[in-house]
Amino acid sequence: MSTSQTLFRGGMIVSMDPAVGVMPRGDVLIEGDRILSVAESIDAPGAAVIEASDMIVSPGYVDTHRHIWQTQLRTVATDWSLFDYFVQMRSIYSGFYTPDDAYLGNHIGALESINAGITTVVDHCHIMNSPDHSDEAIRGLKDAGTRGIFCYGLYGNPENWSEQPTGLSDGWRYDDARRIRSDGLASSNDLLVFGFAPTEVTATDFETTCREISFARELGAYRISCHVSMGNYDAGTEVVRQLGEAGLLADDLLFVHGATLTADELKWMADNGAALSVTPETELQMGMGNPCAVRALDAGVRTSIGIDIVSNYAGDMQAQMRLLLQAQRGLENAARTDAPREIRFKALDVLRIATIGGAEALGWDNQIGSLTPGKQADIVLTRCDDINMVPCIDPVGALVLNANSSNVDSVFVAGRQLKKDGKLTHVDWPTLRRDIRQSSERIVKGFHSIDRQAIEDAAARLMFR
Ligand SMILES: [Zn+2]
């Protein structure tokens, strides 16, 4: 490993470390993959210098929930409910993916997230149509250079559209998950580690869910990602409470959405260390309820943000922070009978959820999530001289309410520069762009070759029983 030093000089520092806070002007020194120091002025003779004046220096964003494979289906879900998503994405589009498509979706999706300043991503990957799909999905992430957790999804995508969708998995995926764990993702010290995603817990019986969680633990999955508490789609199921009563809640569980988690379930999670990923835009659009982040934080749950699906919207954290912030403020303001004198939920609160909060949810807060000496050098430089960023009076407000991916100038993951001067450093974009367009055209054509009425009817019986 290189031990060369790099000095980020003269930037606005938004550290997310309470001991450092926000500095109007400061330096950050890294060596190899680690942060050495953060201070107003650092003398580092021999270090390579990156001039960061007119930039905000901040920790990389942590996206704790994404189905990265859907990159080449961008915008198909624009007007979907969760029911539409289940019928069209999970029961039809997914079946047309080849291993090459899985590679392209995951590779370009991971690059898109790096481009936006996301340095850690949890891939809840349910595109395992064959063992080759698993290998290619992982290769796509590794080639992109992101840090993250690859959660092996057990969900059974359709192989034959005359059959009714059940999501139930064939036995081979158990063997394949075991193979991936012992072969492709054996180490817990690599940038990408092994996680697990059960069959949809709301589509199977509770015993199956328990068995799958036990299987994930037998494999040593670092995190187990589960969709739960999605409004009226699974009202009354209370899977989290059931898992609590069964003694299965622990800090390896990462629940996703959770918009309708009860106070009792949030307490179960807080008491047992289980974490939450809210995905604001999906929850607001698809009929799951209002994002639960502040209720969860108030209950003591480790809470984070996921971006979920670029088949629906942009893959950047800035938009999700903004949505979460204003949706919560809207809820709180609407609940009042008087005019608010003060706004309770602050931009810094939501920036915290998107950085160190994500790290805490993944149990990596001693490694990432803030600019803290000794932590990994996962660092983002955001330009403040672009037309949508001038002047930058409050850098926290600028990151949360003004910035977008185009303002992200540089991105480092474990000290490796993956974006420089606004461009990804390790990408042949014209070739990738051509490949993903071809992949997309073929999958969309396949989708339109299917008569989906029978599938829709079967899905309605499953979801609205
Ligand atoms: Zn999801």
Image (cartoon, grey):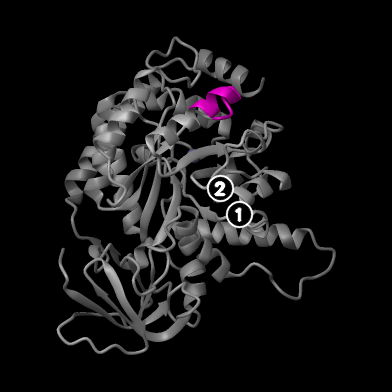
* Residue placed most toward the observer, 15 or 444: 15
Label 2 CB sits under 8 Å from any ligand 1 atom: no
Crowding at dot 2, Cα within 10 Å, few <14 / some 14-19 / many 20+, comes out as many
Residue bounds of the magenta highlight: 201-211
The first of marks 1 and 2 along the sequence is: 2
* Residue placed most toward the observer, 410 or 32: 32
The answer to whether mark 1 and mark 2 are in CB contact below 8 A is yes
Which label belongs to residue 233?
A: none
Which label belongs to residue 301?
A: 1
Q: Secondary structure at mark 2?
A: loop
Please indicate, yes or no, whether residue 102 appears anywhere in the rendered image: no
Q: Separation of disc 1 and disc 2 at Cα?
A: 7 Å
Q: Residue at x 32, y 56 (%)?
A: 114
Q: Residue at x 41, y 51 (%)?
A: 315
Residue type, mark 1 in image: Val
Q: Is residue 142 left or right of residue 1?
A: right
Q: Is residue 237 left or right of residue 16?
A: right
Quick check: 218 above or below 45? above
| Residue 212 part of the magenta-drawn span | no
* Residue 53 on image: x %, y %: 32, 83
Question: Dot 2 corresponds to which residue?
Answer: 274
Q: Residue at x 39, y 13 (%)?
A: 160
